[in-house]
Image (cartoon, coloured by chain):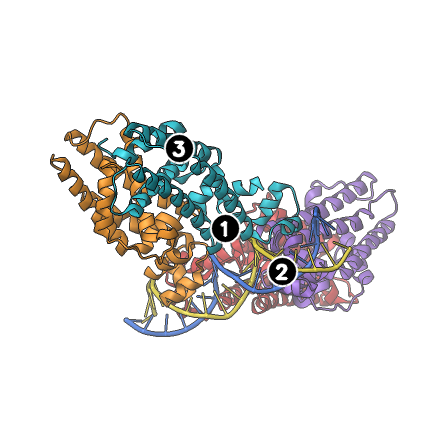
Chain colours: A purple, B red, C orange, D cyan, E blue, F yellow
DNA sequence: GATGAATGAGTATTCATTCAT
DNA sequence: CATGAATGAATACTCATTCAT
């Protein structure tokens, strides 16, 4: 039900009517309820599904060997490029995860939250691995650092995909790789870098 | 109508009924429509109101003189502390601006967007001023840099205030100044700093 | 909401739509929900209301003094006449209590049951009083006897009001007093009397 | 389809879904519609089927010879015992006939009514026969008398089987023969007997 | 004969908004 | 200014029935 994803992404959960969803899918109301328990479950399934795909993208970036700082930056840029390209190709999913899921009901917000928790977990693993390999300093508070890192990434994603301001139809001037590289630079070296 | 702000923050725009709002405010439905044109206008006014207060906080951080890198970091930390303290004292407003406004209707999203655009504008001014004063390198793309910087700040704000994951009742372990300093460090020096 | 009572009586609970009820009452759907919590509550209120009126009728027949057997029969005939006249004037209520309430949902069935339990209790009081006054033999099992007596009365009521077979529009050939007298005779003397 | 009978008896016609019926019977929806024209026809067939069995029980009590009053009472008690035993073994059927059929649709109510008309007819024959044999007085209005008699029996059946008040799971304290004998006594001699 | 996916008309309920008092 | 009863459009969900396989 890809059309449902688009409707949720474009109009938001509450403004998407089941009658719209079934019309877009070309089936009857009854058919919808044969496959889904209800509107809420549809949204949750959509999100769970996206979570899996998103997780796969990130897990491919798992760090294996030590290397120079530049290696590290470019390897992070590669991961972010993958991520941003995935996001670019799955704008509707990202819209729900980054924006539109927030106004919805508990179960849905929970599914969205679960996705970002998994996302953060994956990044924490990567950072910890980098610390073991002495590629990054031994932070006193890794969680906080990762928290801030993930905040950076989701913040950038939101602006880049749905920029001024959070319009699903927004088209950014930057290609995924460009924004990924700039983000990676910022990730490691900040404004001064 | 401070209670309305809380209801929107806690339950979201669509799940907040006017009947709830007036009950919490202790007035009748009719009275509400004497003061507001409707539900949407209530939300917009709430946001516009918050936007002004938020802007005032940021504008106080306008950079005037050149200084060392450390001056710059600590001055930024000061601004962020002010901002984070304001956010801490205005959680309901921030919840709408950062989270709950996203699922709402066009007019409301526009008001939220307007707030962040003003926010970004203020930061851009600060960064440009810092560049003029030779405190920051001459980026090829200032907008992009500021974009990323603002993404970082809003991302951190969201997680810190409404952390795992976006719960309005979430209480962070960090004080405003702590999270502000860590963010400022990251702002200038990234993960490696 | 007398028209609702008629609709329930004529078409049954499940076949009566709220849209019918409000149309018959000349109000809007919204108005209905301002006064009632829902369809179920409407039915329950209707029944509770009828229960009170029915109870009043029966309690007037409370036996005070001893008398001959013929006194007893005629006094019972009087009570039954009152009851049957009430029933005749409140056919819609009786239809729900005797027939149409049975197919409905738990809360409604409970309200109907409660009415008959109160009804039986009132008759038991009367019978016990008659036994104290030595007007009736000391049965070994008063409850059973009253049970059978009440079964007789409700059975007769059902047939007489809604006869062949349980049609709400049925018009009996007998007047309330006639059927009441015959029932009273049967009550005390059975087929042989 | 014995399970259907139970569902109708327990939940009522309107609250029993075809999907429940087929699940309980272990067949598919399609199969149901191969054997039955629809939900209504299922109920009607169930009732017609029961009507026949019920009629057989009563017709066995057809009076053939004259006898004393006590003979008559005990012979009636025997018939009622048979009837009440049948009812006890066919609670689901009786529930529909006595209670749950009442809230249903015209065709079903008609089938239920037809059953009781046949029931009443059988009793009228018995009473007329008893009058011919001079076992009962020549009532001026036999129909009315039989009406009241049948009212008594169905009333007693309902209370005894589904007592306080009309609960399908109700278990009475009395055995069929006990309640039958008490009813027969009442039938002939009333409260005074 | 049997299956179960597909249908769509039908309905109770919600809630922002209005307006007579 | 304030009230709260009245409105009715909007909508998620149900379930008897059908029919291609």
Rendered view: A128 above or below C163: above
- Asked if the residue under mark 2 is in contact with the one under mark 3, i.e. CB atoms within 8 Å, the reply is no
Residue C43 coordinates in the image, percent (x, y): 38, 53
Per the rendering, the mark at residue D14 is 1
Relative to C70, residue B30 above or below = below
Tag nearer the camera, 1 or 2? 1
Q: Nearer the viewer, mark 3 or mark 1?
A: 3
Task: Identify the element where label 3 is drawn.
Answer: helix
Q: Residue at x 51, y 46 (%)?
A: D48
Left or right, residue C4 beside residue A16: left
Do marks 3 and 1 share a subunit?
A: yes
Question: Dot 3 corresponds to which residue?
Answer: D79
Q: Residue D55: where, in percent of width, then height?
A: 46, 41
Please tell me the numbered disc located at residue A29: 2
Q: Nearer the viewer, residue D187 or C103?
A: D187
Mark 1 element type:
loop
Q: Earlier in the sequence, mark 3 or mark 1?
A: 1
Q: Residues within 10 Å of mark 1 (few under 14, many from 20)?
A: some
Label 3 and label 2 in one chain: no
CA gap, disc 1 to disc 2? 22 Å
> To which quarter of the image does residue B155 belong?
bottom right
Task: Locate residue A73, reporting x and y percent.
Answer: 83, 52
Please name whichever residue, B173 or D128, is drawn nearer the observer in this view of the structure: D128
Report the chain holding disc 2: A
Instruction: Determine whether, in the image, residue C118 is placed left or right of residue A31.
Output: left
**x then y, percent, for residue C17:** 45, 60
Q: Chain of mark 3?
A: D
User: Quick one: label 3, few (<14), some, or many (20+) residues within 10 Å?
Assistant: many
């Amino acid at each position: 039900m890809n059309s449902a994803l688009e409707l949720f992404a474009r109009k938001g959960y509450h403004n998407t009517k089941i009658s719209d969803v079934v019309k877009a899918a070309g089936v009857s109301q009854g058919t919808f309820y044969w496959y889904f328990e209800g509107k809420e479950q549809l949204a949750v399934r959509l999100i769970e599904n996206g979570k899996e795909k998103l997780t796969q993208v990130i897990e491919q970036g798992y760090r294996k060997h030590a290397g120079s700082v530049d290696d590290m930056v470019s390897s992070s840029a590669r991961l972010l490029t993958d991520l941003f390209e995935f996001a670019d190709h799955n704008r509707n999913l990202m819209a729900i995860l980054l924006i539109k899921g927030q106004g919805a009901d508990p179960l849905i917000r929970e599914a969205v939250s679960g996705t970002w928790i998994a996302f953060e977990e994956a990044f924490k693993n990567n950072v910890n691995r980098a610390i073991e390999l002495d590629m990054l300093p031994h932070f006193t508070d890794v969680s906080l650092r990762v928290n801030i890192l993930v905040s950076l990434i989701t913040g950038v994603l939101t602006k880049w995909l749905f920029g001024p301001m959070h319009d699903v139809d927004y088209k950014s001037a930057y290609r995924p790789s460009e924004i990924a590289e700039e983000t990676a630079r910022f990730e490691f070296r900040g404004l001064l870098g």
